[in-house]
Structure formats: structure tokens, C-alpha cells
Image (spheres, rainbow, N blue to C red):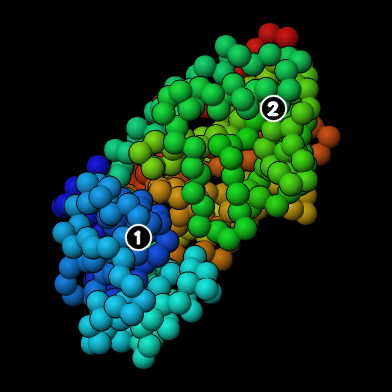
Amino acid sequence: MLTQTESQQRVFRLQEMLTNKDVHAALLVLPIDIYYFTGTRQNAILWIPANGQPLLLVRKSLSRAKEESPIAAIRPFPSSKEFASVFSEEYINIGMTFDAVPVQQHTYYSRALQGRTFVDISMMIREVMSVKSPFELEQLRYSASKLASVFAEVPQFLKAGMRELDLSVEMEYRLRKAGHEGYIRMRAFNQELFFGLAVSSGGVNGGFFDGPVTGKGLSSASPHGASYDVIQVNQPILMDYVGVFNGYIADMTRMFVIGALDPELQRAFDVAIDIQEMVRQAMKPGAICEELFLAAASMAEQAGLGSCFMGMPGEQAKFVGHGVGLELDQLPVLAKGFAVPLLANQVIAVEPKFVIPGKGVIGIENTFVVTDEGGIRLSDFSDEIVFLEG
């Protein structure tokens, strides 16, 4: 449960940003943003003035919000007629997260608070959330350890002749039994994810998902993840799953093979391991995100694998790592065009992967914390490919 001290520290960091940008208050409506500052995910909005105490206005459930949140001022959501009177007229410039707020919601609050100017504070919120506190790091370590413990069980149920779907069901069943919460929250518009991926031959399919591997999925309405395809011997099996415990996300990929692995795929895997280690060592405060991606892409190119790095040829993702926390796609992103420095205690899932047409998918992924010594991995689960007898 979020402590009062933890909540206050988060609020203070945002208030400092608001003051520096001459924004008088933040009006937050996205549930995960509200949860980050208040510790409750009830149907509510959160008002954070640049100076003063936050106010949580709850539609439902007021009683549960009061039980869960350390915020002092928690009230019922006011009627439309009373809404404007809740907020002093001195607050003129009001911040909202335009990256996630529907136009309908923006219109409603613009009418309710006439005479105010609404400005975008999406990057402020994302930057505040990107740097993890000791409390958050502990939550992330727990998620990574729970996820790793389920990955360790895969050799017990992975068999030749089972469908990708069957493999995913076995993995997801165990994750849920371990306490996986099920929600994979993503900020990006038009993106969806269900637990993760268990793919073999289906891994070489293209798709909408903004990642290196998409999977065939079960239909054109759900074109992502495991398919009905049967897992064969001597095929690479990529399992990319997200662990969500107490709201916090860890991301991990491991490779499995029943039988033997094609030498070209083994070489690509070795390159992926080398890229991951290069990035890990460079994950220090001040390192430029774009430069880490370009260095990773250069290593892939030098290995003759540039055309299939981070996706199918022609459909490659332009990143090699992404921030994680309460959302799967937090800042920072180790990506082309993201020329910003890393900060201490940011948490990044690094995932160098290759999609080789006619061969399969191969790669690795682990979640790391940015420190002065480079990236510190959140779990100690082995990176090695697991070979099983056919």
C-alpha cells in the first residue's frame, strides 16, 4: 500500500515541474496516473495544485478510496453545477495529459471550468513516473522474481506436438496462480497486450504490435500472441511474458528448443546476448538513449543481421529497450530520435531480438535498473537457451 510519505514525494516532484512551467494545477483523469499519486484505482479525478494539497474527487467507490489512499482530501465527485466552485479562480493554467485524455473528457472539463487554459503535461507525468523510488524498485524486483519463478517451470509442461495456444495457457495459468493481476497497462494509443507471447513458427508473422515479435494470434480480431500452430521439434520457441504484481510490471523473454537449433539462429542469439550486455554496461546516468539504440543496431549490422534486427525485414521496431513500471511503455525508450540522457533509477526492459524469415524468432529480454555501475538486472534467472529432448 502506498504510504503518505511516498505519495507526498511524488506530488512534490510534479509540483516542482508545474511551477517551473507556470502551470497552476494538474487535473488528472487517467486511472493509472491517479493510482500513481494516490494509491487507489477508483473512478475519480485528481487535482494537484502547484502549491497546496491534492484533492481526490471520487465517483465510485468513495469508501474504498478512503481506505486505500493516504491523500487527506478525498471527497465525492461534485455535481455539474457545483464543479467549478470546488476550484479557485486563481488557477488559470491547468495541465492535462493530452496523450491519454479523450477529446470528450477535455471538452467536458473545459466547459465545467470556463475561462481556464488547458495545457499538455503528458511529458511531465511520464518523466515523474520514469524515475523509481526505493519502494517502487522493491515492487519491480518482486514482480521480476515471481515472473522468473514461473519461467523456471516451462520445461515441465513444454512438449512437442502441443499448440502455441496450449503452451500459452499453461504459462498464463501458472502466472495467475502466482498472483499475476492480468492487467497489462499501456499508455500508447491503439496498442493491446494479453499477458505476453508464446510463439514458434507463428513468430515470423508481421502485425500491429509495436514490438519486434507479434505472433500470429487466434484471429484477425486478435492478431497477436500464440496461435493454433503446433510446436515442432528443432524450432525456436520464444516466450515473452510480462509479470504484473501489485501493479508493477517486469518484462522477460527466454528461448526454448525441443531438439536442436539451426546454427544461424544460435549465432543470432549469441549476438543478442552481446547486444544486451553492451547496453547493460552503458546504462548509466547521462548515457543518451538514442546512442544506445544506434550502438545496438550497429552491432546487429556488423553481424550481418541488420535487416532482421527488432522485427521482420521492413517492419522493424525502432527501439531496443523501453521503460517499465505501472505501464509497459513508460519512459525512457532506447530508440532512434530519443536523444535524452538516462537518469538513475529508471527501469528499462532491454530486448534485442531477431526475426529471420524461414528460420524463426530468437532473442532475449531482461529488466534492468539504471545505476552508476550500469544496468542492474532485477532477476538472476539464466539467459541460456533451454534445450529439451524431442
> Does residue 269 sit above or below 335 in this rendering?
above
Q: Position of residue 213 (x, y in %)?
A: 67, 42
- Label 1 vs label 2, nearer the camera: 1
Indicate whether 360 appears above or below 48.
above
Q: Specify the label residue 239 is tagged with.
A: none
Residue at 57%, 49% (x, y): give it. 320
Q: Position of residue 250 (x, y in %)?
A: 44, 39
Q: Nearer the viewer, residue 199 or 115?
A: 115
Q: Crowdedness of circle 2 by 10 Å Cα count: few (<14), some, many (20+)?
A: many
- Residue 201 picture quarter: top right
Q: Which residue is mark 2?
A: 165
The front one of 283 and 350 is 350
Mark earlier in primary sequence (1, 2): 1
> Which residue corresponds to mark 1?
59
The C terminus sits in image quarter: top right
Where does the image place residue 58, in percent across and percent down from the top left? Answer: 31, 60
Check the image and report above or below for 41 versus 170: below
Residues at badges 1 and 2 in contact (C-beta under 8 Å)?
A: no
The extreme right residue here reads 358
Q: Is residue 210 left or right of residue 132?
A: right
Question: Please, what is the three-letter code of the amino acid marked with disc 1?
Answer: Arg
Residue furthest to the bottom = 115
Disc 1 from disc 2: Cα separation = 39 Å
